Image (cartoon, rainbow, N blue to C red):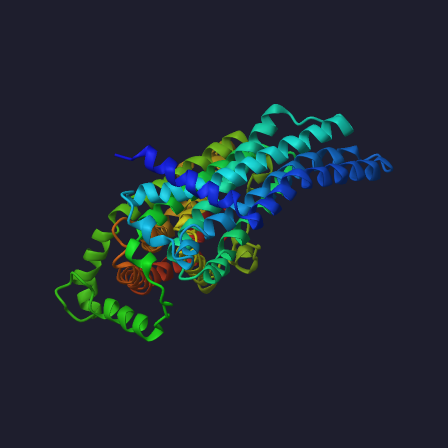
Amino acid sequence: MISLSGISTLVSKELKDSLRDWRIITPIAILTLFFPWLMDITAQLARDFVARYGAFLIAERMYPFLLMVVGFFPITFSLVIALESFVGEKERLTLEPLLASPLSDLELFLGKFLASLILPCTASFLGITIYVAGLYFSTGYFPPPTLLTQILILTFCEALVMVAGAVVVSNNATSVRAANLLASFIIVPMALAIQGISIAMFWANYNILWLAVAGMLTVTVLLMRMGLALFNREHLLTTQLEKFDLKGWGEAFLSSFLRRPGNKGKPFSLANFYREELRLILADLKLPIAFVGLMALAGLIGGLIFALANPYPELVFPENFDLNKLKHVSWEFLPPLQTHAIFFHNLRALTLSSLLSLITIGVMPSLVAVLNMGLVGFVGGEIAILGQKPLLFAAFVLPHGIFEIPAAILTIAAALKIGAVPISPGVKDRLRDTFLLSLADWLKVLLFVTLPLLLVAAFIEANVTPILVSWLYGWEG
């Protein structure tokens, strides 16, 4: 049972400490009271400038963008406050009494989280109010209620993501300096996200803001789960610097690769891998495989729905089509119809997305599954709209797909497990061993399962699928 009184007491203490620190209050006050007026002046100058050329549309698109900027800058101080939440108290030698309190790990984590969130969000919403009021009195512009609501919710979600990430960093850093250096892994992705959102706002595609909100809420949940999974009171009390033991990590990885736990201590061999180890790996990957399968199915259905909503008549295939022309044609995202080109293209995509799994908490490999199957669903839907039989379209996919799709699902599932290690409950005491075992399993799947399947699939796609498609559609081969 969560003690709300305990959490509120901790939040009240943290807020008092922040309000007494002029280094926090002064910049927040400046960004809250003066920055909105600066943005209002910027909006007026932009309006006057574009008015000379009759481009009033540009000024109108700038108003919502500047509104988002006004809300974003004050919440960046949530990052500073959250980074100080645990490691700052450790350096000030005030952490021991806090950890000795009857608060549970969850209550302690939530108290620090909320305390880091309240002050910057209050300042951000106040700054937005000042900007909107000044903009209305100076230009007569008032954002539509839906857009204003979207920006307020988006600003709050941005604060959630930064605070959740910063609390995780502060919980695991050994000094404030180290925490500030690690903060770049939070602020840089957030800045990139803001740039992407700003593009959508300049195009006035405001529905994308809801997708951004959903994405940030998902990342917040994952980061909070990571923080709780890795929370360790004993670790917080240590003051020694943790050295990265590369040799120790290498030896542990080789041990996991050559003698997998659960395999009765048998040394690695290809015969033993295919006879026993692969079965153990697949048993550990049951949940990731099911999740990736659902994501692939969702991508397939989503691509089909998008095709039905956006028919493209220009995709009609000519009756006499020379399929051999595709052997030497390369698009930006598709390889030529050659075995080696297809093989290396698929291997590169799976490998890069897998390597990004840890820093994206498994999002990147899952996204690859969704996009690939979404493309299949889209093209299949377009062909069905044009009057072609869907079973004939299966000739484009099934011959090589029966090898390529299982290989992709297995690799993505193994990579997804790597990304899920930091957010899995009960890993705080064996994080390194769990991570290295997942990495070793992924490498084995890639080398001894995925590579052979991708090679067979690439050969079939380059040499067998074109013949079958040409025969079914009556094209020249």
Q: Residue at x 25, y 34 (%)?
A: 1
* Residue 106 seen in render: yes
Frontmost residue, 440 versus 243: 243
* Residue 218 seen in render: no
**x and y percent of residue 113 in the render?**
42, 43
Q: How many marks?
A: 0
Q: Which residue lies most toward the bottom here?
A: 247
When the figure is inspected, residue 90 is found, relative to residue 140, above or below; the finding is below
**x and y percent of residue 163 in the render?**
46, 45
**x and y percent of residue 66 in the render?**
67, 39
Frontmost residue, 21 versus 377: 21
Q: Which residue lies most toward the left here?
A: 264
**x and y percent of residue 305 in the render?**
47, 32
Q: Residue at x 56, y 38 (%)?
A: 316
Residue 426 in the figure: left or right of residue 117: left
Frontmost residue, 101 versus 227: 101
Quarter of the view holding residue 204: top right
Quarter of the view holding residue 203: top right
Residue 191 in the figure: left or right of residue 228: right
Residue 181 in the figure: left or right of residue 70: left
